Image (cartoon, helix red, strand yellow):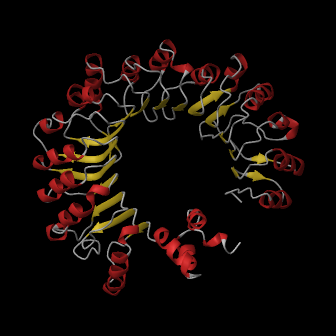
Amino acid sequence: MHFALTLPEITLLIAQHLDQSDLTICIRVCRAWHQTFIPSLYRNVVLPPEPHRIHLQTLVPILHTFQHCIHSLSFQINIATPVWSFDNCVSLRRLHMSFGIATNMQSTSELPRFLANNGRYLTHLTLERFPRWTMHEVWTSLAASCTNLQTVELWNSALDTENQASLWRLCSNVQHLVLKNVFLFTNADSSAMATVAFSRLKSLDWVGVEGVSLSFLCTEVFPSATALEFFRYSCHRQGRIENSHQIDHLCQGLPRGSFWKNVHSLRLDGILDTEFAAILRHLSVPLQSLHASCSGFGGLAMGVMRERGHFATVQGLQLTQTFVESQMVQEILESCPVLEELAAPQLYGRDVVSGRPWVCRWLKALSVQIVLDEEASRQQAQVFERLAGLVLLKDMHLRSNFRSSAKPALDFRLERGLNLLRGLTKLTRLVLPAPQILGEEDVEWMVEHWINLREIVGTLNTTDACLEMLHACRVVNPHD
């Protein structure tokens, strides 16, 4: 056994499951462990925003010695940043840099040299809070040095016109591009962006970006992005919806290009039902995932999904805070055979009773408010019977809100048909729709049949003995 624990292959496997404190202890066990665990200890480095001078004196030589082990590095740019002297980060793949309150032009003067030495190793780059006054040399060095990037993320930043050409050149060969709350200063749409062919781009997150219109994306950018599979657009910026009319340009640009031929996943916030219908109508491949929360998604878009055969292929639907009605939710459950995740506003028991059986046998996560009426007993039995068929279900979120709190809710007691759900053996999380009055036999049944259950969210009006029984089986109830 002692010999086995000195093998590098085994110790490296062990290191994947240890945190920093455990690794610090392991390197002190013996010389073999020290040599093996050191790379894991310095694999992910996050530097404090303003390290104390005494800490810097200790930190800099240590990090410099083990810079070749660093795989992920995150720091805030300042004059005293200890990484400026690094010139051999051969393992560095992920870099996260951000500007702070004290960051100024002098702070960034050493950044081009650092990028020239190490930028070629990077595959994932995240830039945060880069201000408009960022030196041109910083952006040009980013574009010139980081030539093997697969993912670029730019958050809460602003770019002048002269720096945008470097940004788009930096992103020209990436597969994943994320822009969130970015202001592009320009009098018109950036011609520099139009000169770049985003031929390798697979996913684009365009959230709260100002300065480049959607019509420009459609006519000048998307036609070259032939590999695009996922597109996220949101006109939300700092909690507000702005310029939602720009989505019209997206719809106008759809027929002209072939850039939707590989798109199978969409996340679109704050747009109208008619606009959703137009977008879904122009998809060339079957839809796999749609996130439409906080939008006008409704009957028109549902009709297009039905007509274009998207029900047969969709695996994930996020439809909370939309105009999706109860009958539409029932139609989804009875028409989407490969659906794995569904979040919808509400489902009435009467629609379950009058509807067809559910066919979504692959469903693993369900979040919907189930509302019963005066025929609660009959409806509950039918709902439980439908839920019982979802044998792969892991997360069942049967939330409620104040508007329906006075109406009957599902009752999770054996006398009300709880035993119908005995097949949900994979269930790990249950969010109850209303306060439940559970007896010991009800809790014993849950513990016995839902062996993977780890969390019950909701108010349980039960005995201390029942709560102890849940705790003994590692079931957490935040309302205890």
Q: Is residue 27 visible?
A: no
- Above or below for 370 versus 14: above
Question: Residue placed farthest to the bottom in the image?
Answer: 54
- Above or below for 189 versus 26: above
On screen, residue 438 versus residue 100, left or right, reads right
Identify the residue at horizontal 20%, vertical 65% (top origin): 111
Quarter of image, res 359 = top right
Q: Nearer the viewer, residue 342 or 323?
A: 342
Q: Position of residue 308 (x, y in %)?
A: 47, 14
On screen, residue 461 versus residue 205, left or right, reads right
Quarter of image, res 347 = top right
Q: Is residue 63 visible?
A: yes
- Above or below for 191 versus 304: below
Quarter of image, res 376 = top right
Q: Quadrant of the C terminus?
A: bottom right
- Above or below for 291 versus 255: below
Identify the residue at horizontal 70%, vertical 47% (top origin): 428
On screen, residue 86 versus residue 411, left or right, reads left
Q: Nearer the viewer, residue 20 or 412?
A: 20
Q: Position of residue 301 (x, y in %)?
A: 45, 20
Q: Position of residue 477 (x, y in %)?
A: 70, 56
Q: Quadrant of the N terminus?
A: bottom right
On screen, residue 61 versus residue 191, left or right, reads right
Q: Tag count in the figure?
A: 0
Q: Nearer the viewer, residue 113 or 208?
A: 113
Identify the residue at horizontal 68%, vertical 28% (top origin): 361
